[in-house]
Image (cartoon, rainbow, N blue to C red):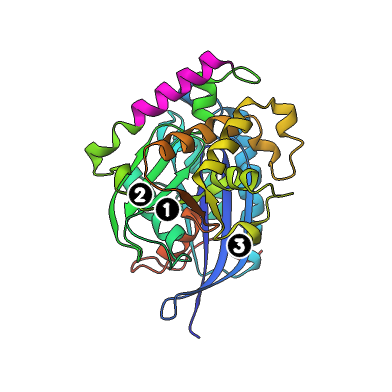
Amino acid sequence: MSSRRVAAVDCGTNTVKLLVADLDAESGEERELVRESRMVRLGQGVDESGRLADEALERLFEAVDAYAATVAEHDVETLRFCATSAARDASNADVFTAGVRERLGVEPEVIAGAEEARLSYDGATRGLPDVVAPLLVVDIGGGSTELVLGDAHGSVRAGHSLDIGSVRLTERCLPGDPPGADEVARAVEVIDAALDELPGHGVDLADARSLVVVSGTGLTVAASALDLPDLDRTELHRATVSAEAARAAVASLVAMPVAERRTLGYMQPGRADVIGAGALILDRVLERTPVTELRVSISDILDGIAWSCLEPGRERRGPSRR
């Protein structure tokens, strides 16, 4: 097998993730070597202040230092670092860019929403050959949500990135613990207004015949609906959850105080205070689709970024072994 070792970093509003893998373009095989996720809350306060908080940058750079060491240890040929919502919106993005460049030796790419949607779809659908098209991939992040409609074999029909996410929506609409009925109603109003934009971008949720959730919010809601003791990626990959069970899980999570959420075995500590907002986004999407169940994919935008490293023009680059 002729493979290429690549590393992908996905820097979102809530988490920064690393994947190191050997990829074979001919067979389509992906051999995962390292997959790691750290919650750094880069988007802390960005919606209100318009800038990345100093403490958030410190958390991010600590994670990137660790990732740089991992990449160097694995003799990676090509590294791609993609940043999404928080870095797109920040007035001090130059500090972020310089810090990443210094630590990893690559320029972080602040990708546009359309590219984010394409990469999310590609990563999510590679391991799900048996889904019925049109297929809707839902990737709920901390600052934005990507919704991509396409065919089962990687062909995107349309996609759009909405400026709603678990962190952004919590800060804007859900300060209560647990949130009151008026706060939830306000959040639903904001989500619905954002979803109303989708048909204008070619994404009609009513067209979906399958729905796939990826990323932390989707996996957490699925784990809740399946009553799993922990966030077992092996158990969750390709799992099927009825829409009814998923929506019941959303209602339960939204109504639960943060302290109680933290006691759940499948709840990552850095997600407990924002899962309600992310779950509400999924609930409102399900409301607008005819699907009766959803599928779970542990492959996501990170895998899409990794496979994009094989595209022409992506030369060998990244930190050397120290």
Q: Earlier in the sequence, mark 2 or mark 1?
A: 1
Question: Which label was assigned to residue 148?
Answer: 2
* Residue density around tag 3, few if under 14, some if 14–19, many if 20 or more, within 10 Å: many
Tell me: residue 241, above or below residue 2: above
Q: What's the CA distance linking mark 3 and mark 2? A: 30 Å
CB-based contact (under 8 Å), mark 1 and mark 3:
no
- Examine the structure image and report whether residue 37 is included in the region drawn in magenta: no
Q: Earlier in the sequence, mark 1 or mark 3?
A: 3
Amino acid under disc 1? Ser
- Residue bounds of the magenta highlight: 180-194
Q: Earlier in the sequence, mark 3 or mark 2?
A: 3
* Residue density around tag 1, few if under 14, some if 14–19, many if 20 or more, within 10 Å: many
Amino acid under disc 2? Val
Quick one: 9 or 72, which is closer to the camera?
Answer: 9
Closest to the camera, between mark 3 and mark 2, is 2
Q: Which residue is mark 1?
A: 120
